[in-house]
Amino acid sequence: MWRNKGKTTGARTPLPSEAPTTSRTPTPARAQAVDSDPEPVDSLQKHYNNLCLEKSQEVNPFLLHILQGVDEEIRKGLKAITLNIAGNNHSVPVERVTGLDIRYNLISDVGAYYAARLLQKKHSLLYLNLMFNDIGPKGGELLAKALHMNTTLKYLRMTGNKVENEGGMFFAAMLQINSSLEKLDLGDCDLGMQSVIAFSTALTQNQTIKGINLNRPLLYGEQEESTVHLGQMLKENHWLVELYMSKHDVRNPGLKQLCDGLNLNKSLRYLDISCNKITRDGISSLADVLKNNTTLEVIDLSFNRIENVGAVKLSETLASHNRSLKALSVVSNSIEGEGLVALSESMKTNTTLSNIYIWGNKFDEATCVAYSDLIQMGRLKPDNTDVEPYVVDGHMYLAEVSNGLKKHYYWTPTYGEACSPSSNAGFSIVPVSEQL
């Protein structure tokens, strides 16, 4: 069963949902069936029709025609199938595909060569998802150079492809030329310090990029040079909406550099600084920013160590000064009852903060009662937090629920909606632009 997703004009066309990230089903354009695959459906054409009906999506007649041909090839016993979705085929009714999602396959640099050719020739492609496809530096170079001339692609997702510092430099150079790309995801791509600095420099001039993901670069040294350059970029860039710096080895001095930039920035709405080394001392800088900043709407502080002192500092600012932040995640921050209760109290006076995520901290009964009260009084909607209250023997407890800012960043569920607002609240609150 093929598990690729695509977008057609105006909306993503649903195809069978992809596998979780723990298994990698080889499903590029020429795919080989493997024994570990689930049993194939009797008809891809029928399955596509049913999914369109289930998702209230309009059937793309062109894709329907192609899948009918694939079904015929499968019935003949062929295992290697080519999906020909060329948009200039005039012998069949064509509704051009505007998005291509082939995540978690094995296309490697060879496939990247053909993807680059697609970017050079196909003028209707808006979205290309190549995440985790074993693409290396050479493939990254080919794709980056193809975007020099491309004027239509809006979102390229390269997550998990080890393009390394060499490939990253080509993408940074591309941003000095390309004027149409709006979102670039290079998280977990083994970028180096040189390429992170190059991106910082390019973004001081590029006015079209609205979102960039630089998660988990390979940085060595204790000087936090990357945050110095990114902080400087934030001072000069007034177009960027999303910045992802998870697993960036940010410490308190580095956060101070970023906050110095945020004090002068009037465009950034989504800041992800999760999985870093920020402690209660560094939170003072962020709390000071939130006193004056009126654009930040989502902050992800998950998996740091701000403790009670940091949580109380944030709650004081949220209660008395800030009225722009809508979502805050402090998951797994070594916060105890005092800090968690303080954050809940701030929501009683701050009516703008609608989403808060606290799982992974140290709950006492006062914490459980406080968040239960917020939910019961309607101040905190059940879909806007990652905890749910329940009572055992007269005592209140909190259970974890699968809500968050971006729960489905690496995977999609086997059932239910993959892009629901409750599991991807950050993207719902801060949409970069249409379809992004």
Image (spheres, rainbow, N blue to C red):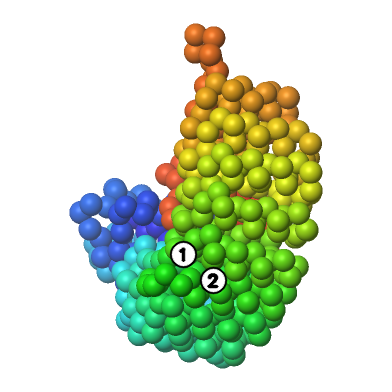
Dot 1 crowding, Cα within 10 Å, few <14, some 14–19, many 20+ = many
Across and down, in percent, residue 105 comes to 34, 65
Looking at the picture, tell me which residue is in the foreground, 278 or 233.
278
Which residue is labeled 2 in the image?
227
Q: Quadrant of residue 372?
A: top right
Q: Is residue 367 above or below residue 223?
A: above
Q: Is residue 82 above or below residue 53?
A: below
Across and down, in percent, residue 210 comes to 65, 71
Give the residue displayed 49% in from the left and 8% down from the top: 393
Dot 2 amino acid type: Thr
Give the residue displayed 66% in from the left and 45% down from the top: 313
Looking at the rendered structure, which numbered label has been put on residue 248? 1
Across and down, in percent, residue 278 comes to 51, 55
Residue 194 can be seen, yes or no: yes
Looking at the picture, tell me which residue is in the foreground, 37 or 153.
153
Looking at the picture, tell me which residue is in the foreground, 67 or 177.
177
Q: Is residue 186 left or right of residue 354?
A: left
Secondary structure of the residue carrying tag 1 is loop
Give the residue displayed 64% in from the left and 26% down from the top: 370
Q: Are marks 1 and 2 in contact (CB under 8 Å)?
A: yes
Residue 69 can be seen, yes or no: no
